[in-house]
Image: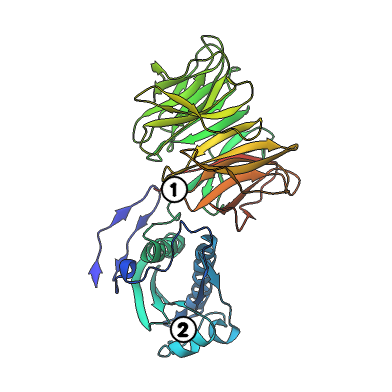
Amino acid sequence: MLISRIKKSLFVLIVFIAASSGRCLGDYDYIDITNPFLRKIPMAISSFSAVNRGNDEVDQAVKNRELLRKSLEFTSYFSMIHNKILTSGNGSKAAPPGLNFKKWTASGVELLITGNVEIIDKSIKLKLRLYDTVNKKMLLGKSYKTTINNSRKVIHRFCSEVIYCITGSRGVFYSKIAFLSTSTGKKEIYISDFDGYNPKRFTYSNSITLFPAWSSDGKWIAYTSFAKGNPDIFVKSLDKRQSYLINFKGTNSTPAWVPGKFELAASLSYSGDPEIYLLTGTGKINKRLTRSRDSDLSPTWSPDGTKMAFVSKRAGTPQIYIKNIASGKTARLTFMGKYNTQPEWSPKGDKIAYSAIENGEINIYVIDSAGKYPPVRLTHSAGNNESPSWSPDGSLIVFSSTRGGASRIYVMTAFGTDQRQLLSMPGEQTNPKWSPRF
C-alpha cells in the first residue's frame, strides 16, 4: 500500500491512501464513449459494510454508497441493477462474505463495486473495489482516509478512477457549472458542482448579468454585466481576489477565452456594428478578428486555438461561421434554417453544438466542425432549448430548457439521450457553462 502525498484543493485538505490492482485500460475496453449507440453496462453496488459495526459507520456506509451510485449513474454509462437480495440493507454491520461471482452474473451484473467504511476518531476510511464479475477479476482497488465531511470528494475521486479505468477519460467529477439565475430577482451568476449540488452565488451586481465564460485553467470567469449601466465585460478570478473591467463605448459582450492563454475574444461595438476582437485578460485590444457590415458575436474557440467559430448576420440571417486565425479565411458552417446561434466547440474539436429556431421552437443541434455532414437535432418537442455547453470530456451537454414551464438547467449525453433536469431553484436558470476539469 502506497501512501500518497498530501494534496490541497481550494477549500479542503484531502489525505488519501491508494492501492491499485489490475490494468483496466487496454485489458478491459468496455466503453467507447464516441459510440452513439452505446450499450449501458449493467452495474451493481453492494451494500457497504461497517468495519466496527457502529451506528455512525452504518449511516456513513448508506450515505456514501448512495452518493457513489448517483454519481456513476450521472455519467449515463451504466445501467444500475437494484437486486434487493444482493444490494439490500441499510449498511451491513458484518464483514462481507467472499464474493460469489456466479450469483452476481446470474442477476445480469457485469461490473460490481464493493466497499467498507471505518470511522477512526474524526476521520473516515473508505475501502472501495471494482470487479469484473464475468472474468472474475478485481479491476480497481482504492483506500481513502479523510475527514467525515469530505467524503463526497473522496467518492468522486474514486468515480473518476472507475471512469478512467474503463474509458481512458477522467470524466466530469472535477468540474463545475456556471449559470444564470433570477433567484434574487436579478440575473446573477451561480456556480454548482457538475451534478448541480451546492449552487453558490458568484456575482452580486444587482443588475443584469449575461454570458459567463470559464478560462481554460478554470481560474477566471468573464461575463457581461449592466452593473455600471452599460453592457461591460467583467473578468474575475474564481477566488474573487482579482478583477478587471472591459468597458469600451457601446456594447461589450459574449467573451470567450483563448485555450491555454490569458486572452479572450469578445464582441465590441465601439467602432460601429458589433465585431469580434482579441483582448488580453486585462482588457487591452490585441487585434480585430472579424470585419463585416453586420453584427458578429458569440465566439467559441477550437481546443487548439487555431480556429474560431462565431455568429454573423453577414448573409442576412444569423448563421455560424468558422475563421482560421492563421490564414484569416472565414467559411460559413450552417446552411439549414434561418436562425443558428450560440455555437459551442466540443473539447475534442470535432463537433460544434448550437441553438437553432425552426417552426417557432428553439432546439439544440450538433454539427461536425468540418461541415461535411448535416447537423443532428438533439432536442425534440420539449419547449425551447438553448445555450448548449460541453462537459470537459465531451460526453455530456448541459443546456437550458423551458419544457417544464420556467427555464431550468438540464443535462443530456452528447448524442441527446438521457435528458434530465440538473437542479431546482427559485426563479429561472439559463445560459449554463461547463468548466474545464479542475
Q: Is residue 299 above or below residue 273?
A: below
Three-letter amino acid code of the residue under disc 1: Pro
The residue that mark 1 highlights is: 392
Could one spot residue 179 in this view of the protein? no
Amino acid beneath label 2:
Arg
Q: Which residue is identified by label 2?
A: 53
Which residue is at a point 36% across and 66% down the rendered structure image? Answer: 165
- Whole-angstrom CA distance, mark 2 to mark 1, is 40 Å
Labels 2 & 1 near each other (Cβ < 8 A): no
Residue 152 position within the rendered picture, expressed as x and y whole percent measured from the top left = 46, 61
Relative to 231, say whether 343 is above or below: below
**How many numbered callouts?**
2
Q: Does dot 2 land on a helix, a strand or a loop?
A: loop
Rendered location of residue 400, percent (x, y): 63, 43
- In this view of the protein, which residue sits in the foreground, 53 or 81? 81
Q: Residues within 10 Å of mark 1 (few under 14, many from 20)?
A: many
**Foreground pick, 379 / 171:** 379
